Amino acid sequence: MPLLIAFKGKSGFSARNTAEDVTKGIDGHGLTAIITEPTSGIGLETARVLALRGVHVVMAARNVEAAAKCKETIIKSCPSATIDVMKLELRSLKSVTNFANEYISMGLPLNILICNAGVTAPPFSLSKDGSESRFATNYLGHFHLTNLLLDTMKNTAKICRREGRIVLVSSEVHRLTYKGGIIGIIYGLFKHLQKNISQGASTTCYLALNPKVKGVSGEYFADNNVAKPSGYAKDAELAKKLWECGHFHLTNLLLDTMKNTAKNWRREGRIVLVSSEVHRLTYKGGIIGMFSLFLYNSFYAYGQSKLANTLHAKELTRRLKEEGADITINALHPGITETSLSRHSNFMSSNHNFFHLGFSKTGASTTCYLALNPKVKGVSGEYFADNNMAKPSSNAKDAELAKKLWECGMELTKSKSTRQV
Ligand SMILES: NC(=O)c1ccc[n+]([C@@H]2O[C@H](COP(=O)([O-])OP(=O)(O)OC[C@H]3O[C@@H](n4cnc5c(N)ncnc54)[C@H](OP(=O)(O)O)[C@@H]3O)[C@@H](O)[C@H]2O)c1
């Protein structure tokens, strides 16, 4: 079913235009593009259309067999297509580093980087590097990939005398996110209050040995004094439920030994749990993933990862402009598109007819518009939808937040950012 109402924007295109429409007449020969996860949906159509326009497409996929099949399908419809397949698992920073190393060692140029891969609502899980899975796939993996390939893009832009383009597939859902935009960023704010290691260990040692806390139990301490914990931390019912979930394995196993030691030595045993002030910042309900899985807000987690894409575009634009590099980076919403993206979401799957109105053909158009169309030459750090520039959320325009997210991304990828693994 085609879109019923679609107004043309300044670009001359509307939501109704396809990826072929927005790249019509554009010669992509001599250009090389990486597309993350082009084995289905929008990524696959993007790969097909770029290849159709003569671009050398490198399919970066976690399932290389599926990607090889997609390559064959594209070549059948477009025999002159130049396509390579390479392995990339965005949830693993090591895999991203390996991909970048291999790509660089092949000596290939890179004009266009399309960060397309994305997950919406899989059950809560952590990536191999310990980040929430949506944040890891949709943002952190792409952040790391972009950083590792930036020099190659800069060199290519210089040699080809043609602007490099980074395209980040974000979403309108970037508007629905945690209060403040991105959680976990806050840690950066506290950096100036940081203690040295010896100061950091003081409250632990105070609780372990100091006679002043004899008999004190079940309390929360900070800076060597009793402190007021959060409301959730005082909730006895929540504490009981968490206990029933069977955690504290080590403590439980050693408890008898501690009891006996205390009896024999006639000296109080002490268990010291190193918590954090960050215990105040949790999901609604206090603890997620144990007895109330639904309290983990997967929509917000998705929104946050997509907000991170828009902030990535903003901050990298600032940095590239400072250097005078000939590379643009923009984020986009592809439109509600019939793909398998909602497979993890009960809500979206059960409302399939509402969410998938048959707009599949147009889903790759804004990506391809940003990748190839000369109308966006020099445009960077912006948000696009329906083949036109669009207004993002206020969080997405927050330069300070973008900077903090960058620092946070650097911190999270630091140990893996060297090219040797
Ligand atoms: N469809 C929409 O209505 C819509 C709306 C707004 C934004 N978007 C965005 O558009 C982009 C493309 O999505 P789509 O709709 O085309 O969905 P899709 O068909 O599900 O494609 C997403 C692709 O990302 C891949 N992927 C997931 N986790 C990955 C990982 N850890 N490493 C590498 N690849 C991974 C998936 O691979 P597997 O198949 O192996 O899981 C899949 O091929 C996403 O960024 C999505 O957030 C889509």
Image (cartoon, rainbow, N blue to C red):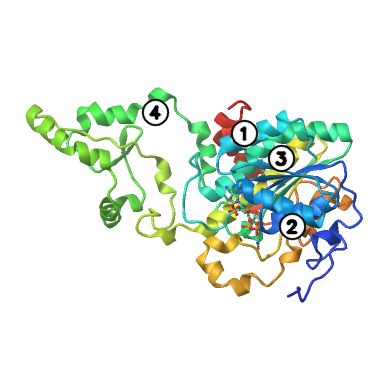
Residue 156: quarter of image: top right
* Amino acid type for the residue under numbered disc 1: Thr
* Amino acid type for the residue under numbered disc 2: Glu
> How much space separates mark 3 and mark 2, taking CA atoms?
27 Å
Q: Can the viewer see residue 178?
A: no
**Residue at 65%, 63% in the rendered image:** 339
**Residue 269 higher or lower than 379, as above or below:** above
Q: Single out the mark in the foreground, 3 or 2.
A: 2
Return the x and y of residue 13 as percentages of the image width and height: 85, 63
Return the x and y of residue 3 as percentages of the image width and height: 75, 73
Return the x and y of residue 61 as percentages of the image width and height: 64, 46
Residue 315 as seen in the image, left or right of residue 5: left
The numbered mark, 4 or 2, whose residue comes first in the sequence reads: 2
Asked whether mark 3 lies closer than 8 Å to ligand 1, one says no
Which residue is denoted by mark 2 in the rendering?
45
Q: Can the viewer see residue 96?
A: yes
> How much space separates mark 2 and mark 1, taking CA atoms?
26 Å
Do callouts 2 and 1 mark residues in contact (Cβ within 8 Å)?
Answer: no
Which residue is denoted by mark 3 in the rendering?
316
Q: Single out the mark in the foreground, 4 or 3.
A: 3
**Residue at 52%, 68% in the rendered image:** 347
Which residue is denoted by mark 1 in the rendering?
97
How crowded is the residue under tag 2: few (<14 C-alpha within 10 Å), some, or many (20+)? Answer: many
